[in-house]
Image (cartoon, grey):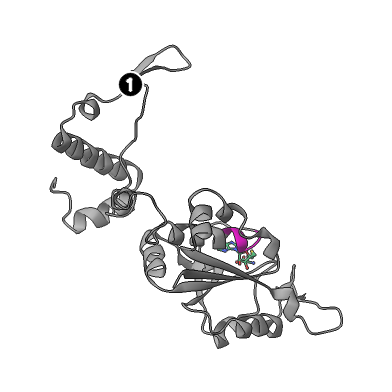
């Protein structure tokens, strides 16, 4: 059974969008995963087919109605995996979460627009909130795409070589080492010749591995003290 992404949105035409290209697009074509969108507007019942209304208590913006959102959620209640509302108040998406979701049967994603969704439907459906980061998007769709992309590339059969996965940023609690390709000597825009670190062309696999590990550690310590502390606390920095 293919991994299944079900997306509830007011803008179904946005999908698959970027997920139809490159790696996720090829995996979608191959049937490694399935993409389903549900237009929340189809579940609007009043004569104006309104999906949103003004907030009780006043204030700017509109709020998505609980009855409409609930009806949409009810229509996909049998889809596999957890229901997630993309929201800046949610737990921050990380690689461990993407891996957990990719290991499961799929995910149902609720995309907010305007000021967001009436709290009661989030409470009654016990929906988990997941955030892309500490910034505000105009809608949940780009966040849903990012989450799906992060999961899909982890699915068996999505990527050409499985081993490129466990070397990557975050997989071992470190940012990734730098990459180099041809030409080995390259003149930059200021006329300076830049050569590839010698160890990488030495053909010495163990030295390459050690160099990469050291670079990953250096870059992580420099840029992400939070990740570095966790890595040191886990006792991983012993050079193996
Ligand atoms: N009034 C809200 C922001 C609403 S933005 C607040 O201040 O918290 C409109 C929609 O965009 C949200 O309902 C949510 O689905 C989505 N969204 C915005 N920022 C997001 C983020 N950082 N991560 C995930 N979804 C986000």
Q: Quadrant of residue 17?
A: bottom right
| Residue 163 versus residue 120 in the image, above or below | above
Residue 181: % across, % down: 36, 29
Q: Residues within 10 Å of mark 1 (few under 14, many from 20)?
A: few
Comparing 212 with 226, the one in front is 212
Q: Name the residue located 30 percent from the left edge and 40 percent from the top edge.
A: 177
Taking depth in this image into account, of 233 and 240 the one nearest to the observer is 240
Q: Which residue is mark 1?
A: 184
Q: Residue at x 13, y 48 (%)?
A: 238
Residue 51: x %, y % from top left: 75, 76
Q: Quadrant of ligand 1?
A: bottom right
Kindly identify the residue that appears in the image at 33 percent across and 49 percent down.
161
Question: Is residue 146 visible to the viewer in this orientation of the structure?
Answer: no
Q: Is residue 167 left or right of residue 119?
A: left
Label 1 secondary element: loop
* Relative horizontal placement of residue 32, taking residue 233 as reference (left or right): right
Type of secondary structure dominating the magenta stretch: loop
**Which residue is at the far bottom?**
124
Judge whether residue 141 is colored magenta: yes
Q: Determine the residue located farthest toward the front in the rendered image.
A: 30
Q: Quadrant of the N terminus?
A: bottom left
Left or right: residue 60 compared with residue 206: right
Q: Is residue 175 magenta?
A: no
- First to last magenta residue range: 138-142
Give how far across and how far down residue 94 sits, in percent.
41, 60
Q: Is residue 160 above or below residue 62?
A: above
56 and 24: which one is in front?
A: 24
**Residue 45: x, y in percent?**
79, 84
């Amino acid at each position: 059974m293919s991994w299944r992404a079900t997306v509830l949105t007011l803008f179904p035409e946005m999908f698959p969008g970027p997920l139809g290209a490159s790696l996720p697009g090829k995996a979608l074509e191959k049937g490694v995963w399935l993409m389903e969108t549900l237009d929340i507007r189809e579940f609007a019942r009043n004569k104006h087919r309104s999906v949103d209304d003004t907030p009780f208590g006043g204030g700017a913006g509109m709020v998505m109605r609980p009855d409409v959102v609930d009806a949409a959620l009810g229509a996909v209640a049998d889809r596999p995996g957890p229901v997630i509302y993309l929201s800046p108040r949610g737990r921050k998406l990380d690689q461990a979460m993407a891996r957990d979701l990719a290991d499961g049967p799929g995910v149902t994603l609720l995309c907010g627009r305007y000021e967001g969704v009436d709290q009661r439907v989030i409470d009654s459906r016990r929906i988990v909130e997941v955030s892309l980061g500490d910034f505000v998007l105009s809608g949940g769709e780009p966040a849903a795409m990012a989450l799906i992309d992060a999961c899909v590339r982890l699915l068996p059969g999505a990527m050409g070589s499985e081993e490129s996965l466990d070397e990557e940023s975050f997989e071992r609690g470190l940012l990734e080492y730098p990459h180099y390709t041809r030409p080995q000597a390259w003149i930059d825009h200021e006329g300076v010749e830049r050569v590839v670190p010698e160890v990488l062309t030495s053909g010495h696999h163990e030295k390459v591995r050690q160099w990469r590990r050291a670079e990953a550690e250096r870059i992580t310590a420099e840029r992400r003290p939070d990740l570095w502390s966790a890595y040191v606390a886990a006792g991983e920095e012993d050079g193996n």
